[in-house]
Image (cartoon, rainbow, N blue to C red):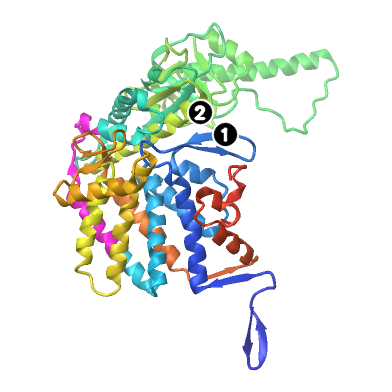
Amino acid sequence: MSQRMQGQPMIVLGDDADRLKDEDAQSHNISAARAVAESVRSTLGPKGMDKMLVSSIGDVTVTNDGVTILEEMDIENPTAKMIVEVAQTQEDEAGDGTTTAVSLAGELLKNAEELLEQDIHPTSIIRGYDMAAKQAREEINDIAVPVEPSDEEMLKNVAATSMTGKGAELNLELLADLVVETAQAVAVEADDGSSVVDLEFVDIKAKPGRPVDASRLVHGGTIDTDPDHEDMPTEAEDANILLLDAPFTVNEMENDAQLSVDDPEQLKEFIEQEEAVLREKVQAVVDAGVDVVLSKKSIDEMAQHLLAREGILSISQIKRGDIEFLTEVLGTQLHSNLDFETLSADDLATGDISRDPEDGWYVVESDDSHGVTLVVRGSTQHVSDELERGITDALDVVAATITDGRVLAGGGATEVELAGRLREYADGVSGREQLAVEAFADAFDLIPRVLAENAGLDSIDTLVELRAAHEAGDGHAGLDVFDGDVVDTFEAGVVEPAHAKSQAVSSAVEAANLVLKIDDIISATALGEDYEDEQEGQGGGMGGMGGGMGGMGGMGGMM
């Protein structure tokens, strides 16, 4: 690229650089974003399909969780990464609805491209989309139904709706009960009197090898490690517990240090000195009144023997995640630079430790905390991992529902209602922004259409029936994907948190507007070949993402 200044060419970009401007840049970006959105669309709803993700080192993940799919994909295209950020934002803010948010963003861009072809300026589209998003959030507030934190039946419906389609169908009632019980166990009352669910006090563990109905809630933290010495006690009530993140050993020498011993007496003296140091540390533990020592790192064998002789239980080599969660359960800190000479009762926590009769691990509880462990079972690792993802999402949405206190009808009912209300709102919008508002309304129709398609139903007929029901005044009319009927999904127990829906609208429109605002792409490497491949592959769903996505084909052979 060069420009002339006072008759002389001025070189701005290198020979290998490339540039796309205006319509080409917009088309390139929209194609990339739509390809990402279309890659997860088939996972939407209870009848959504799963994706098998194979990493570069051969690890296999089978899931229909939108954010997991997008995070595992090897995406290099910068525009496509913006859409991935939509899923990540939705996950962080709402815990669920990632596929809805990403699909909605893709549809907004698809509709925007049609407006661009009609010579409508991107600024007008962006302004219209912002107006529509604001109105949509207001309409969500209007149609949302309040729910009390104590309404267990409604909370179970929220959990069940979130988990349906994620391998939980056969044990949906049990898992929904566990999710609600878990959320209520860690709910606290805020200063303003509202309820807040603190998920920092929840540890979810996926353990394969047993059926899903063996999943259960354990009050406290768990340690799947045996005691260090067979003579140690196996349980303790109202115990003083020390959490360590440092080796309980004699201070080790530097790696390059050498010890020269001239005769056996010197070696004996050296060993005795080490033993004396360990005895001093153990005695400091005894003097501080410690009953249990839990350590992430190793404990010297001699120290183990001395602790056992004092009747102290010690467990070492505990997993990082387990011992860090115990700091939450016990309300204490993890000591990494502990001076045993100054060890006192202030460094200890109080709790109960016992061996679980069913699984054999240790359970640590405290009266001053409400930490719980949700044990998720599954016949195989893949099953338990997918259930863990589904339960994590369900916990997030139940927590959001308890905090926000509002729910919406599911099964596409809310989207059809919002689409109708936005079309009415568009009649009062002047200028070209009216077309953008109508395009936004049309984008909402994608959700019920995809729900129908993924269930093997006719999407056009379904959408016509849903619109007719809503025009007749049934604002809760949605699709029952299991029998194909249009029903009152709210009465059927298919409900979603209002917060997640509102966040999905915000995330989708922000991403779409960000893409639309770009009118110039300047790359240090050539774009032309990738762009041509992308145009040829567009419309082929995931198969069209190999070259045109500028790197999405590197997903471990998936594409």
Amino acid bearing label 2: His
Q: Nearer the viewer, residue 457 or 19?
A: 457
Q: Residues within 10 Å of mark 2 (few under 14, many from 20)?
A: some
Most prominent secondary structure in the magenta stretch?
helix
Q: Is residue 229 above or below residue 56?
A: above
Quick check: 523 left or right of 128?
A: right
Precedes in sequence: disc 2 or disc 1: 1
Q: Residue at x 70, y 15 (%)?
A: 272
Residue 399 placed where, x, y %?
30, 37
- State how far apart marks 2 and 1 are (Cα): 9 Å
Q: Is residue 407 visible?
A: no
Residue 279 placed where, x, y %?
60, 16
Q: Is residue 437 above or below residue 161?
A: below
Q: Residues within 10 Å of mark 1 (few under 14, many from 20)?
A: few
Q: Residue furthest left?
A: 473
Per the image, label 2 sits on a secondary structure element best described as: helix
Q: Disc 2 marks which residue?
A: 382
Q: Disc 1 marks which residue?
A: 60
Residue 341 found in image quarter? top right
Residue 424 found in image quarter? bottom left
Residue 205 placed where, x, y %?
45, 26
Q: Is residue 132 magenta?
A: yes
Q: Nearer the viewer, residue 214 or 190?
A: 214
**Marks 2 & 1, CB-CB < 8 Å contact:** yes
The segment highlighted magenta reads: 131-155
Per the image, label 1 sits on a secondary structure element best described as: strand
Quick check: 528 left or right of 323?
A: right
Amino acid bearing label 1: Val
Q: Residue furthest bottom?
A: 6
Number of numbered discs on residues:
2
